[in-house]
Amino acid sequence: MTMAVLCIDFGGTEIKLGTLEGADIIDTASLPNTGDESDLTAVREVALRMPGRIDGVGIAVPGVVDRARGALVAAQEKYEWATGRDLRAWAATTFDAPAVIENDARAALLGETAFGCASGATDAVLLTLGTGVGTAAIVDGVLLRGAHDHAGILGGHITVDLDGPVCNCGNIGCAEAIASTWALRRDAAADPALAAALGAPGIQALGIKSLIDHSADPLVAPVLDRFVRAWGAAIVGLCHAYDPSVVVVSGGVMRSADILLPRLTRYVHDHLWSSSFRPPLLTPDAPEHSVLLGLSAAAPRKDQ
Ligand SMILES: [Zn+2]
């Protein structure tokens, strides 16, 4: 029977599962994120029906992870049930295999440098766009964690506008508070004309893709431009901090990379410190698989 790593990506709107052998994806499944502890039972039921013998488990969560405790320290509201809970112990008991728990952006960067668009890079940063703005950094071949597991992953919470909105993290004018799915929904809820121009049946259906799809509209174009500048400013900050040879921009919306990537690249290259290397901005072939690939690379195995 195939030995496989079970990878579980707890995302903002759905939970993705995959069984992988290295970079080979054997099977995938997804289920809705209900924001309730019962999600663990649902994950177990789906995972145990997937092919392959589970040899190791990798879990990604959208928040700060205490690697020593195997627990989520802080995350968005959908994961209140998981905060402080030892997910590594849950996985080890449920699947009888050793497990690792990782921040989702770190896992995505690990996946893209191990198997993907930045394969082999020893100095790289990642920005992932979606419900929030996740980041991660690898410097001199080391995935940054810091003294308290916060290093590299809060690049979306760099202030890019001192007079900007208060972020749900408590800081002011974070890139994420200006340019993310939740920021767009907040702005559209406060501006019916913008909501109408974005063409969604309801605020909760809006995403960054709505901006791209309606970017020819004169009300939408400046909003997309502000989003690009906020992300660009965050990337410039990451490049100034970490001096990468490549920047990975991920997230499902990067399937529209032909619209976003040239604009982001221009912003970043125009605003970097004069002698800074101008790194290429790359997007994964399958941004939806970055996290699963990283978990496959990071997960411990039974006989190790
Ligand atoms: Zn913030």
Image (tube, rainbow, N blue to C red):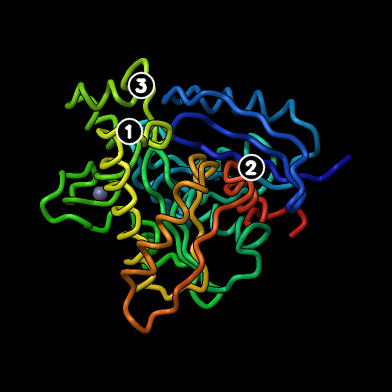
| Mark 3: secondary structure | loop
**Which residue occupies the extreme right position in the image?**
1
Residue 7: image tag? 2
Q: Which residue is labeled 1 in the image?
A: 77
Q: Quadrant of the C terminus?
A: bottom right
Q: Amino acid at mark 2?
A: Cys
Rounded to the nearest angstrom, the CA distance separating label 1 from label 2 is: 22 Å
Q: Which residue is labeled 3 in the image?
A: 199
Q: Is residue 198 above or below residue 134?
A: above
Front residue of 71/17: it is: 17
Disc 3 packing (10 Å; few <14; some 14–19; many ≥20): some
Front residue of 44/276: it is: 276
Can you see residue 26? yes
Tag in front: 3 or 1: 3
Q: Amino acid at mark 3?
A: Gly
Q: Position of residue 205 (x, y in %)?
A: 39, 22
**Which residue occupies the extreme left position in the image?**
163
Q: Position of residue 145 (x, y in %)?
A: 43, 64
Rounded to the nearest angstrom, the CA distance separating label 3 from label 1 is: 27 Å
Q: Amino acid at mark 1?
A: Glu
C-beta proximity under 8 Å, tags 3 and 1: no
Residue depicted at x 68% and y 30%: 47
Q: Position of residue 280 (x, y in %)?
A: 51, 67
